[in-house]
Amino acid sequence: MATIGMLATGVAHEVNNPLTAIFGFAEGLRRRLPALKEKVDPRVMEDVEDYVATILRECRRCQDIVTTLLTFSRQKTVSFAAVSLNAVVNDTLKLLRSHLKQRSQAKITVRVDLSENLPMVHGDEHQIKQVMLNLLVNAMDAITGPGRIIITTFQSSQGAVCLSVEDSGCGVPTDHMDKLFEPFFTTKRSGKGIGIGLSTCMSIVKKHQGEITVKSEPGSGAVFTVKFPVNTDKTT
Ligand SMILES: Nc1ncnc2c1ncn2[C@@H]1O[C@H](COP(=O)(O)OP(=O)(O)OP(=O)(O)O)[C@@H](O)[C@H]1O
Ligand SMILES: [Mg+2]
């Protein structure tokens, strides 16, 4: 794992520099396009605009992958404190609302069912947000066309503070179940996913001495549930 992490960081750093240059020059080209407009055949101009837009869009995609890889492998100092799981859910949803719109997946209805008086979690807020974000993005990816996502927080009978993300998406085939949390296991097309979301979730949850489980009926969605230990005597 450590070696994969180091390799990923190395590659990400190496790719980042040329990528920044490509992005910067493509931006420069885009800024100069209006000046070319009168001098160039309009049909050629249309192609050039299209090419530049494509270069910029694909650069952004590469930058996203690099950022994900760096986040995945970075040994950040973790600071454990009392964290409100409900606040984490609300913050992450705010982040993702624009993502939902961007991907024109507004047909996905999101239901949020947050338990009141939930005890605080003992954990690192940033990392817990990352878990939530990865689970939500996966849920969105699993849904093609209309669908629903249900996000729930609750306290288990053993006292753990829990978050579950349920979707009505494609579900997980039985023979994929034990591979889901392996680094770089993905069923998504290249550029769409690299297979580190769930392995990152697993390593974060383990660091928190928590648990992550999945239930799925292939074809009718999946539920991912994360359990965190309680931070003593505080409530949201
Ligand atoms: N909610 C879900 N429903 C169905 N399949 C899922 C769900 N979440 C994860 N999976 C399956 O598990 C695989 C691994 O998920 P993971 O989040 O680790 O990687 P990814 O989403 O493919 O890529 P990345 O998260 O790195 O962008 C996915 O490719 C998908 O096949
Ligand atoms: Mg993912």
Image (tube, grey):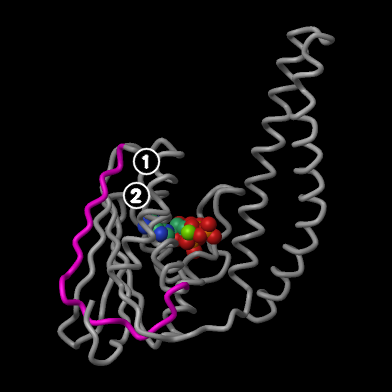
| Residue stretch in magenta | 107-126
Label 2, label 1: how far apart the Cα atoms are: 8 Å
Is there a contact, CB below 8 Å, between mark 2 and mark 1? Answer: yes
Tag shown at residue 170: 2
Whether residue 64 sits left or right of residue 25 in the image: it is left
Q: Amino acid at mark 2?
A: Cys
Q: Measuring 80% from the left and 9% from the top, which residue is drawn there?
A: 38
Instruction: Decide whether residue 157 is among the magenta residues.
Output: no
Which quarter of the rendering shows the C terminus? Answer: bottom left
Considering only order in the chain, which callout, 1 or 2, is on the residue closer to the N terminus? 1
Q: How packed is label 2: few (under 14 Cα within 10 Å), some, or many (20 or more)?
A: some
In the rendered image, residue 66, in percent from the top left (x then y), is placed at: 66, 58
2 vs 1, front mark: 1
In the rendered image, residue 94, in percent from the top left (x then y), is placed at: 37, 54
Which quarter of the rendering shows the N terminus? Answer: bottom right
Residue toward you, 217 or 198: 198
In the rendered image, residue 85, in percent from the top left (x then y), is placed at: 30, 72
> Which residue has dot 1 on it?
144
Q: How packed is label 1: few (under 14 Cα within 10 Å), some, or many (20 or more)?
A: few
Q: Can you tell me whether the CB of the residue at mark 2 lies under 8 Å from the nearest atom of ligand 1?
A: yes
- Secondary structure beneath disc 2? loop
Q: Is residue 64 above or below residue 80?
A: above
Whether residue 41 sits left or right of residue 128 in the image: it is right
Q: Amino acid at mark 1?
A: Thr
